[in-house]
């Protein structure tokens, strides 16, 4: 079976909120150079979902990873290879910058068509920069295949894909024909660590790099947007926290309760 | 082609009742429709949803389309897309709004890509630009570290709205509106996935979404026990519910269904008590609408204190028992 996973390099979402600075001229946020970008955590879990299927028969299943961007840091985008993916395709060009979900899904779908053979496509449920969560569904619609979003378990049973989909008060179990696209949520469980052997193997693998022309698109990135950013801004937060302190932690706890009563919160 | 006109709200019904998010969407939709001097329509999709139509009218809808079919009992992308495709084609709306729910976050992008238009997800504010009549949509981005306002010029404009971000209008049973059956053929060749089973993970006691008091724990609690004992005990005394940030869920200390945050539940209780929660942006997205936030955390620099009204710095294990005890005394 051929599986394709879409992975995005993002600013580190786990970094302290104070590291995010507004770059108003370019309508984006930036982090200082010492904060290294990462693979979007949900995308790592999408790689994990594919690898769990590959684990059932390593020789029979192939996992290809596609990442889109510009100036992609090789150590970052190669992480899925070090986890156990077979190949890495980069859609890398300055023209890919500044796209919205429509532009990104269009380019990824074109790349997937160029790969040609696929039974399952995996994406993270959303990426941690724009938190949009629509690229997966978009790719599926463009390719004309079914999609199941926000999965916590994915198995192939009898030529179909069986998915547990997280909903507000539990989960649905769905079955879809293949090829299909699945978006993966954190409920799948932690992604595996890269092994030393995996890191060695990944360092020897060269990614395949495609430009917009290679996937047959003349409009990509900002030029292919459907939505327009009117403004990007950071809401001003005034800290108004009243800190309660006392001689002992227990006294502080009791005083906190008293404060809540004085302020009619309880 | 007919001119795009009016607003279409995709409503949600559970056990015959209109969900709160739908009343919120109708409240927001009513304001937009009045500004545009156009109609506010609502579509209800499911197996038995017709009884809720009058409530949608009371909540602000001018016209309610009711699409009922046994195959629409549980949400599935393909069946709902058949309905929405026909609904857009027949009613030619200017704007479509849905909830940022299990349904909306799946359906909105799929529909937008099918129509070749944009959708703006998880909005906190919707406003009409009086000059162009296009809708501006404001939403949190970068895990809540920033906000962005988007617009698009292709119609229909589609947006999903975060739960509890909009106010419903006061329900008025005397409001007049039309309720019409909207039949859609379930073309089997277009249905490629089916729901085999629906598993409910019910949590005992007050539901997190409905609770006026929520006591939530984070990584700092270091295991499942404090959730089951200390937090549950205080929640019971305050007639509230227990919640968690993401790490306790990922570590399987608590069920995923009590996760509060961007990808979990979005809540806005009167009182939110955060124990051992650092307050990452992704967590705060789920609780920043709370009226009063109280935090206990060992790190004085923790982000939670930027959002809290009252705080104590220190080891929760030393602070919490006296805090809970004092609350119980005060409640007597």
Image (cartoon, grey):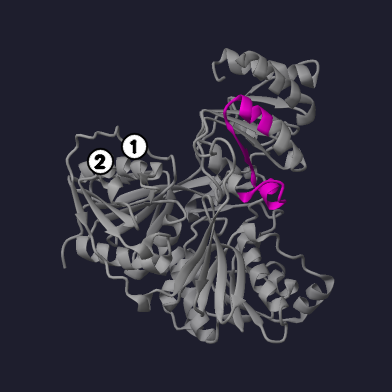
Q: Tell me, for residue B60, which label it has, or none.
A: 2
Q: Are marks 1 and 2 in contact (CB under 8 Å)?
A: yes
What residue sits 53% from the left and 36% below the top?
A: B288
Residues packed near mark 2 inside 10 Å, few (<14), some (14 to 19) or many (20 plus): many
Q: Quadrant of the C terminus of chain B?
A: top right
The kind of secondary structure element at disc 2 is loop
Determine if the magenta segment contains residue A130: no
Residue A171 rendering spot, x and y as whole percentages: 55, 57
In the displayed structure, does residue A172 sit left or right of residue A153? left
Side of A4 relative to A199 (left or right): left
Question: Which residue is depicted at the point 48% across and 74% down?
Answer: A107
Which residues make up the magenta segment? B232-256
Residue for badge 1: B168
Residue A167 appears in the picture as rendered: yes
Calculate the distance from the C-alpha at mark 1 to the C-alpha at mark 2: 9 Å
Quadrant holding the N terminus of chain B? bottom left
Residue at the spot 74% in from the left edge and 65% down from the top edge: A192
**Horizontal and vertical percent position of residue B293:** 58, 29
Name the spot of residue A106 as percent of width and height, x first: 44, 73
Quarter of the image where one finds residue B163: top left
B76 shown above or below B56: below
The one nearer the camera, B298 or A1, is: A1
Above or below — where is A166 with respect to A147? above
């Amino acid at each position: 079976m051929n599986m394709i996973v879409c992975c995005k390099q993002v600013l580190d979402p786990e970094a302290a909120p104070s590291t995010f600075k507004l770059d108003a001229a370019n309508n984006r946020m930036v982090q200082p150079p010492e904060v290294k970008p990462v693979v979007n955590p949900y995308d790592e879990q999408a790689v994990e979902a594919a690898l769990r299927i590959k684990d059932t028969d390593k020789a029979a299943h192939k996992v290809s990873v596609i990442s889109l961007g510009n100036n992609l840091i090789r150590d970052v985008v190669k992480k899925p290879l070090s986890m156990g993916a077979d190949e890495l395709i980069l859609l890398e060009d300055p023209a890919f910058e500044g796209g919205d979900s429509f532009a990104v899904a269009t380019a990824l779908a074109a790349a997937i068509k160029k790969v040609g053979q696929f039974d399952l496509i995996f994406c993270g449920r959303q990426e941690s920069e724009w938190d949009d969560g629509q690229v997966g569904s978009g790719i599926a619609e463009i390719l004309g295949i079914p999609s199941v979003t926000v999965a916590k378990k994915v198995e192939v049973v009898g030529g179909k894909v069986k998915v547990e989909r997280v909903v507000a008060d539990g989960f649905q179990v769905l079955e879809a024909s293949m090829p299909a696209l699945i978006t993966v949520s954190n409920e799948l469980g932690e992604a595996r660590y890269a092994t030393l052997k995996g890191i060695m193997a990944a360092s020897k693998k060269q990614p395949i790099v495609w430009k917009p022309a290679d996937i047959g698109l003349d409009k990509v990135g900002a030029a292919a947007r459907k939505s327009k950013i009117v403004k990007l801004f950071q809401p001003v937060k005034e800290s108004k926290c009243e800190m309660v302190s006392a001689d002992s932690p227990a006294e502080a706890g009791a005083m906190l309760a008293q404060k809540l009563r004085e302020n009619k919160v309880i | 082609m007919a001119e795009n006109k009016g607003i279409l709200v995709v409503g949600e019904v559970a056990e015959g009742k209109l969900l709160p998010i739908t009343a919120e969407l109708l409240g927001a939709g009513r304001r937009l429709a009045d500004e545009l001097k156009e109609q506010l329509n609502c579509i209800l999709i499911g197996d038995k949803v017709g009884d809720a139509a009058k409530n949608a009218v009371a909540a602000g809808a001018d016209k309610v389309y009711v699409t009922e079919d046994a195959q629409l009992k549980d949400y599935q992308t393909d069946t709902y897309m058949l309905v929405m495709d026909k609904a857009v084609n027949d009613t030619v709306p200017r704007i479509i709004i849905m909830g940022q729910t299990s349904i909306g976050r799946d359906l909105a992008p799929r529909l937008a890509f099918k129509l070749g238009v944009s959708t703006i997800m998880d909005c906190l504010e919707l406003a009409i630009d009086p000059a162009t009549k296009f809708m501006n949509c404001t939403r949190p981005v970068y895990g809540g570290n920033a906000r962005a306002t988007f617009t698009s010029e292709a119609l229909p404009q589609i947006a999903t709205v975060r739960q509890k971000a909009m106010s419903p209008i006061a329900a008025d049973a005397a409001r007049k509106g039309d309720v019409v059956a909207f039949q859609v053929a379930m073309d089997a060749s277009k249905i490629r996935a089916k729901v085999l089973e629906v598993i409910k993970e019910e949590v005992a006691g007050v539901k997190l979404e409905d609770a006026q008091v929520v006591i939530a724990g984070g990584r700092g609690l270091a295991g499942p026990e404090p959730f089951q004992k200390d937090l549950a005990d205080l929640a019971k005394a305050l007639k509230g519910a227990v919640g968690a940030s993401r790490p306790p869920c990922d570590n399987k200390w608590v069920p995923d269904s009590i996760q509060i945050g961007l990808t979990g539940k979005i809540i806005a209780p009167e009182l939110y008590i955060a124990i051992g929660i650092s307050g990452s942006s992704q967590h705060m997205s789920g609780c920043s609408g709370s009226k009063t936030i109280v935090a206990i955390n060992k790190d004085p620099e923790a982000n939670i204190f930027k959002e809290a009204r009252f705080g104590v710095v220190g080891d929760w294990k030393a602070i919490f028992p006296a805090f809970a005890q004092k609350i119980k005394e005060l409640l007597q």
